[in-house]
Image (cartoon, rainbow, N blue to C red):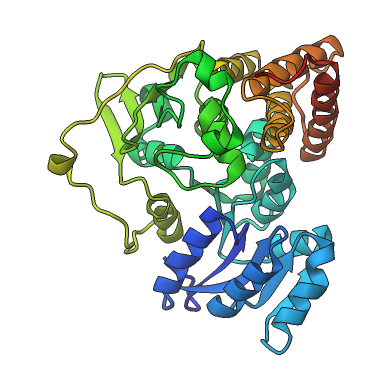
Amino acid sequence: MVSPGGRRRVTVLGATGSVGRATLDLIERHPDLFEVEALVAGNDAASLAELAARTGARRAVIADPAQGPRLSSILEGSGVAASAGLSAMLDAASLPVDWTMAAISGAAGLAPTIAAVRTGGAVAFATKECLVCAGAAFMAEVGRAGATLLPVDSEHNALLQALGGQPVADVEKMTITASGGPFRQWPADRIAAARPEDALKHPTWSMGAKITIDSATLMNKGLELIEALHLFGVEAGRLDVVVHPQSVVHGLVTFRDGAVTAGLAAPDMRVPIAYALGHPHRIDAPTPRLDLVQLGSLTFEAPDPDRFPALRLAREAMEAGGAAATILNAANEVAVALFLDGRIGFMDIPRIVADALDQASRRGLSSAPATIDEAIALDGEARAIASACLLESRPRSQ
């Protein structure tokens, strides 16, 4: 569980986000097992400095260069080395540590996650866009580096545990669950009129704004299907989604003989993070224990493709292959940002994604990126297309 020299050295990319903070909470509870090499964050210099000083990190890196002076000022005399900017972030991700948490959201997390993979260590990742934007290229990098890839999304972590080391050839179906988000029981007209503050009220999980909106549209489940396709090497036809409001069952594996195994846990991100931190062993975690008697019942239902078209779009992109998933993800990031800024309505999110996919197809953007650089370039082109779709679109949904 730890390196021969003592404690396992770790780096956390996205330290100030919900996953990063949960990771550091577990690390601080096991000072005999882990030591922090580097913490990386986006633009919250004060929080990053506080976390770095508290955990004894050797270095702290802020991605926003404008926040560099403030970070350095706060950490002056602390013994923590401070730096800023993309180059510094990639340098930190490239440190030869034993274990890296890659939790920078969106396509921005692709380059630092790849840098961590190339060290050949264990990489726990909550950045699903790595596999959505550049699935084949990303997995090829993992293979070349001999890195160990550990999913931290609760669904994929549950699938990994439910698989139990069995060959994927013996799997008939893998199913991930969805809480259904805040609009699970809302009628279509009410969903169309939803405001950002409505969509950010997730019934189960406490997450960042972008992923919370993806949960409300069910796009997150579509992205997770694409992620599972690359991570486990299964075909699109063997992947499914079921709505499970209690968020207790996170993933199910159906085998060729009809047996089904499932990963169950309280909806606490520290459960999958603890699994990844301790892998291949287990560590103690202060997470709620399931009391099935108290729960009483667990319910399941099919997702509604009419009220939640984003999931359908993601399925279609997964089945189409090629560049579709990269374009889908980029357009979705643009549309979600526009919605959070109040510039478009909720149902304009899937509409802009659909328009961007159509425009990209008309422009002949069909080939899957063969390298990480190609994926980043395609992501940028897709964002420009999505932004243009906004300018050409009808007025904001009411």
Residue lying at the far bottom of the rendered structure:
77
Residue lying at the far front of the rendered structure:
398
In this image, 345 relative to 8: left or right? Answer: right
In this image, 286 relative to 16: left or right? Answer: left
In this image, 188 relative to 45: left or right? Answer: left
Q: Is residue 18 above or below residue 172?
A: below
Q: Is residue 199 above or below residue 53?
A: above
- Residue at the (67%, 58%) spot, across then down: 119
Residue 83 drawn at (x, y percent): 78, 71
Residue 171 drawn at (x, y percent): 37, 24
Numbered disc total: 0
Q: Is residue 326 visible?
A: yes
Q: Quadrant of the C terminus?
A: top right
Quadrant of residue 363 within the rendered picture: top right
Q: Nearer the viewer, residue 18 or 324?
A: 18
- Residue at the (83%, 63%) spot, across then down: 65
Q: Nearer the viewer, residue 33 or 270?
A: 270
Q: Quadrant of the N terminus?
A: bottom left
In this image, 112 relative to 274: left or right? Answer: right
Residue 140 drawn at (x, y percent): 67, 38
- Residue at the (74%, 16%) spot, across then down: 357
Q: Is residue 228 visible?
A: no
Residue 34 drawn at (x, y percent): 48, 72
Q: Nearer the viewer, residue 113 or 96?
A: 113
Quadrant of residue 395 within the rendered picture: top right
